[in-house]
Image (tube, rainbow, N blue to C red):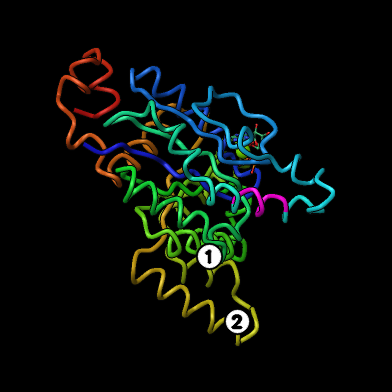
Amino acid sequence: MPKYAQIVMGPAGSGKSTYCSNIVRHCEALKRRVFVINLDPAAEVFDYPVLADIRELVSVEDVMEDESLRFGPNGGLVFCMEYLSSNFDWLEEQLDNVLEDDYVLFDCPGQIELYTHIPVMRQLVERLETSWNFRLCGVFLMDSQFLIEGAKFVSGILTALAAMVNLEIPHVNIMSKLDLLSKQSRKELDRYLEPDLQDILDTDMPSGSTAFQKLNSALATMINDYSLVKFVGLDPTDEESLNEALMQIDNAMQYGEDLEPKDTLEELEPEEIQNDYGL
Ligand SMILES: Nc1nc2c(ncn2[C@@H]2O[C@H](COP(=O)(O)OP(=O)(O)OP(=O)(O)O)[C@@H](O)[C@H]2O)c(=O)[nH]1
Ligand SMILES: [Mg+2]
């Protein structure tokens, strides 16, 4: 039987750590066991209990204080993540208490270079899948306030695609912080959750330069043809949206398919089964 993990990614401040603590709270109510591992060596605040914290192995603060290394914050973060990849034994030890069927959230740093050309996240994914028997789903959060507009939307989905093509694992995009959207943006939300990119570009960016119009159009065709990008909206004030996100992620990594019935549904109250699994 495998173990399961979400690799929680997304730009700085997109809501990764808040998402992890909301999922922990939501799963407690469902009587589901979830662990969180902080993999952000620059993390300052999070309010979930951790199974492991990379800062016990190495932290950006320590690296920046080291006179011989002389790194700034970004170089320091890359150094820390490379240090992790040379010390996967440490992570393996931390995962000792994770049993078959257990579920782990990895709260990752936001720097996009970790998902484009620096190999550490790819190496981590390979180690989790092939040596430690995990089934994985990449969960990519993006702040809705930076998405509801043509040009921002195109940049946002290219960032998500970079992580998707680099890691090659099942992938769910989450549009976070819906509670902060204006009334006007909320009205437009559906157009962005299941986007027709060409339509968005035609409406929002009708008069760009011809060269960029061609490029955008080619991107739109590729993304539409392969159904590459859609989003689950997340509003932390709406428990149903958390439930929807969790179900999509569970489906993506086939969580629950191998579980014995007693481990899942029988432990739940009848109303919970009705509400949370739509049975
Ligand atoms: N209103 C609202 N605020 C949110 C939501 N999610 C996160 N925030 C706030 O946004 C800020 C950043 O959230 P974090 O969860 O720390 O984001 P992060 O992606 O972990 O950030 P880094 O680890 O620094 O990359 C915090 O002030 C959160 O309280 C949300 O869904 N709604
Ligand atoms: Mg964080």
Going 46% across and 21% down the picture, which residue do you hit? 25
Q: Position of residue 23 (x, y in %)?
A: 45, 29
Going 82% across and 53% down the picture, which residue do you hit? 70
Q: Which residue is mark 2?
A: 212
Of the numbered discs 1 and 2, the one sitting upstream in the chain is 1
Going 85% across and 49% down the picture, which residue do you hit? 67
Q: Is residue 241 visible?
A: no
Identify the element where label 1 is drawn. helix
Establish if 245 lies above or below 222. above
Going 35% across and 42% down the picture, which residue do you hit? 249
Identify the element where label 2 is drawn. helix
Q: Is residue 193 magenta?
A: no
Q: Is residue 18 left or right of residue 94?
A: right
Q: Which residue is mark 1?
A: 158
Any mark on residue 107, and which?
A: none
Specify start and end residues of the magenta stretch as a single range. Answer: 76-81
**Image quarter in which the N terminus is found:** top left
**Image quarter in which the C terminus is found:** top left
Establish if 148 lies above or below 90. below
Extreme residue in the bottom direction: 210
Q: Are marks 1 and 2 in contact (CB under 8 Å)?
A: no
Q: Nearer the viewer, residue 57 or 199?
A: 57
Q: Nearer the viewer, residue 254 or 92?
A: 92
Dot 2, crowdedness within 10 Å: few (<14), some or many (≥20)? Answer: few
The amino acid sitting under disc 2 is Phe
The quarter holding residue 151 reads: bottom right
Q: Position of residue 129 (x, y in %)?
A: 33, 49
- The secondary structure that most of the magenta stretch takes on is helix
Q: Position of residue 100 (x, y in %)?
A: 27, 31
